[in-house]
Image (cartoon, rainbow, N blue to C red):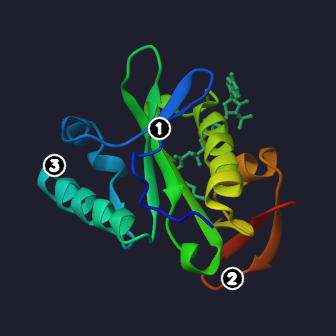
Amino acid sequence: MKLPPYNIFPNITGDKIYLRQILISDIKDLVEISFYDAVQATTVKQATVMQVKINQDYIDGNSIHWGIADQLTNKIVGTCGYYRGLDKGEGELGCVLLPPYRGQGYMTSAMALAIEFGLNTIGLKRIWAATSQQNKEAIKLLERLNFIKIADLDDNEVEYELKK
Ligand SMILES: CC(C)(COP(=O)(O)OP(=O)(O)OC[C@H]1O[C@@H](n2cnc3c(N)ncnc32)[C@H](O)[C@@H]1OP(=O)(O)O)[C@@H](O)C(=O)NCCC(=O)NCCS
């Protein structure tokens, strides 16, 4: 197991995107997709406070959160990462795209990179994700990436796990 933090933040390059650290200058574009403890930011100030907490969670080894950047523009189109379970050798993957960038394959590419990192660098034994039963886009994304449904949870949530 090689848990965060790392000497150098792991930037990962894919085909049309790369995963990189979120910079202060990115935050103004990310307010509507900034969440912490299931609360959504409504101002740049709130999103900045959340980013400080996210950075601390990374330093404490509890999570890793990437910005997904378009290689052509370096603009952040969304975020993804592992937010729970690392101490147990597991990773709960989460992700969100800014609305204008949905339906173009960005997240499929980003999650494939995050999964590869989770298995081969962190050394995770299990990768999972939870979403609501109604979230068709998230379920399609997870199934496209080889996740299978393993449980119905409370509050209409479903749990998916990466098939080994
Ligand atoms: C879940 C979420 C990230 C999925 O976004 P998405 O845009 O559907 O996923 P992708 O970026 O991988 O794009 C895939 C779509 O682009 C299409 N697409 C277009 N060009 C593509 C390309 N070059 N490569 C792959 N897919 C492409 C695919 O056909 C697919 O569309 P379809 O589902 O209608 O078949 C998005 O809906 C979101 O941010 N939701 C809110 C947060 C959320 O629910 N998170 C989930 C937590 S588990």
Q: Check the image and name the residue furthest to the top.
A: 72
Quick check: 104 above or below 42?
A: above
Amino acid type at circle 3 is Val
Is residue 81 positioned above or below 106 on the image? below
> Which quarter shows the N terminus?
bottom right
Q: Which residue is mark 3?
A: 44
| Mark 2 touches mark 1? (CB < 8 Å) | no
**Image position, residue 100 (x, y; %):** 45, 30
Give the structural element (helix, strand or loop) at label 2.
Answer: loop
- Residue at 69% x, 82% y is 153
Q: CA distance from mark 2 to mark 1?
A: 33 Å
Rendered location of residue 158, percent (x, y) = 70, 72
Tag in front: 2 or 1: 1
Q: Residues within 10 Å of mark 2 (few under 14, many from 20)?
A: few
Residue 63 lies, with reference to residue 6, above or below; the image says below
User: In x, y percent, where is residue 45?
Assistant: 12, 54
